[in-house]
């Protein structure tokens, strides 16, 4: 009887534990910060993706100012990188990306996005969680998106 009660208690305790919440990414600019939930998060094991259109965050970013990005350990344990777009003073849109941070002896927990010129205006930045498939091909499996406001 005691064994049955212990098993039932353990089952209820486990049932009370919800799924682990998705990791959040923090974007910092000019003294302010916002935390972003994933806009898209895919599980390659089940081949499913969850999407949250409301997860895109906004932050005021003055032209030429850097954006610091901080990722949690759960994300730093996997390959990740940053993609972004900005406008030059002439109105030309430029797309760019960081290098891919692949965990090894050193894990990358932060990245500072600096645009080339002080008059460049950031449009958006997105952290991408990546999976490496077929040996060396990075495939995005998650996006945390910042929309920059002037």
Image (tube, grey):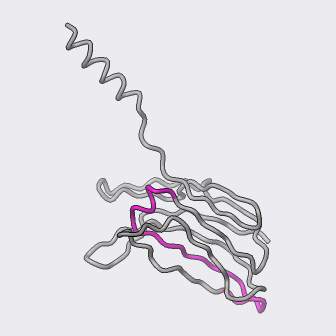
Residue displayed at 26% across by 16% down: 6
* Residue at x 53% of width, y 56% of height: 38
Instruction: Using the image, determine if residue 117 lies above or below residue 113.
Output: below
In the image, is 71 to the left or to the right of 47? right
Residue 89 falls inside the magenta stretch: yes
Q: Quadrant of the N terminus?
A: top left
Q: Residue at x 49, y 72 (%)?
A: 81
User: Where in the figure is residue 22, as x and y percent of width and height?
Assistant: 48, 50
- Residue sitting at the far top: 1
Between 22 and 103, the residue placed more toward the observer is 103
Q: Is residue 71 magenta?
A: no
Above or below: residue 44 compared with residue 125? above
**Quadrant in which the C terminus is drawn:** bottom right
Kindly give the residue lying farthest to the front in the view shown: 105
Left or right: 45, with 63 as reference point = left
149 left or right, relative to 16: right
Stretch of the chain drawn in magenta: 72-93
Q: Position of residue 53 (x, y in %)?
A: 59, 56
Q: How many marks?
A: 0
* Residue 132 in picture, x, y percent from top left: 33, 72
User: Between residues 67 and 44, which one lies in front from this camera angle?
Assistant: 67
The quadrant in which residue 74 appears is: bottom left
Q: Quadrant of residue 87?
A: bottom right
């Amino acid at each position: 009887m005691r064994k049955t009660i212990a098993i039932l208690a353990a089952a209820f305790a486990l049932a009370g534990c919800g799924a682990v919440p998705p990791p959040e990414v923090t974007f910092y600019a000019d003294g302010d910060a916002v935390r972003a939930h994933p806009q898209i998060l895919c599980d390659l094991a089940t081949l499913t993706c969850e999407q949250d259109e409301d997860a895109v965050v906004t932050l005021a970013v003055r032209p030429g100012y850097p954006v610091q990005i901080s990722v949690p350990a759960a994300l730093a344990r996997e390959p990740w990188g940053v993609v972004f777009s900005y406008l030059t003073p002439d109105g030309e849109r430029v797309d760019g990306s960081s290098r891919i941070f692949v965990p090894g002896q050193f894990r990358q927990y932060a990245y500072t996005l600096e645009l080339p010129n002080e008059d460049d205006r950031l449009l958006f930045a997105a952290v991408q969680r990546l999976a490496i498939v077929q040996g060396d091909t990075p495939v995005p499996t998650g996006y945390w998106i910042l929309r920059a406001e002037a």
